[in-house]
Amino acid sequence: MAATITLPESVLQAIRVLERFIRRILAVELYREGRLSLGKAAEVAGARNKWEMVMLLDEKGVALDYSAEDAEQDLNTLKKYLERPNTNDCSRTGHEDHKNNR
């Protein structure tokens, strides 16, 4: 049996803020304990990317556990990103301002 309740928008907003706060603390603590990788911690925290998670860890005084393997993986990812064609690159289209030529 399901029950439905109606809450004011302000209460719902407060719940969302609290959820984000709890997720961030949980992610930081689980990362600190070594139970989550940086990427998984970023996902749990709702961070946009790993670098945002690194900033959060720094704010909380948590040392980054960044191994040589992590560095190599990130370097390979960066290389792949830099090697792919960029369709938004104006220099390849011959247009000075790609946005104005739509």
Image (cartoon, rainbow, N blue to C red):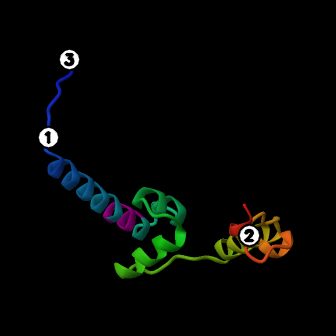
Membership of 46 in magenta stretch: no
Q: Position of residue 102 (x, y in %)?
A: 72, 60
- Amino acid carrying label 2: it is His
- Amino acid carrying label 1: it is Leu
- Amino acid carrying label 3: it is Met
Measure how far apart labels 2 and 1 are at the Cα level: 47 Å
Secondary structure at badge 2 equals helix
Disc ID at residue 7: 1
Pointer 3 with pointer 2, Cβ within 8 A: no
Question: What is the span of residues highlighted in magenta in the rendered image?
Answer: 25-30
Disc ID at residue 98: 2
Pointer 3: residues within 10 angstroms few (<14), some, or many (20+)? Answer: few
User: In front here: 75 or 64?
Assistant: 75
Membership of 27 in magenta stretch: yes
User: In front here: 80 or 14?
Assistant: 14
Pointer 2: residues within 10 angstroms few (<14), some, or many (20+)? Answer: some
**Position of 98 relative to 40 (above/below):** below
* Residue in the image at 46% along x and 66% along y: 34
Nearer the N terminus, badge 3 or badge 2? 3
Disc ID at residue 1: 3
Secondary structure at badge 1 equals loop
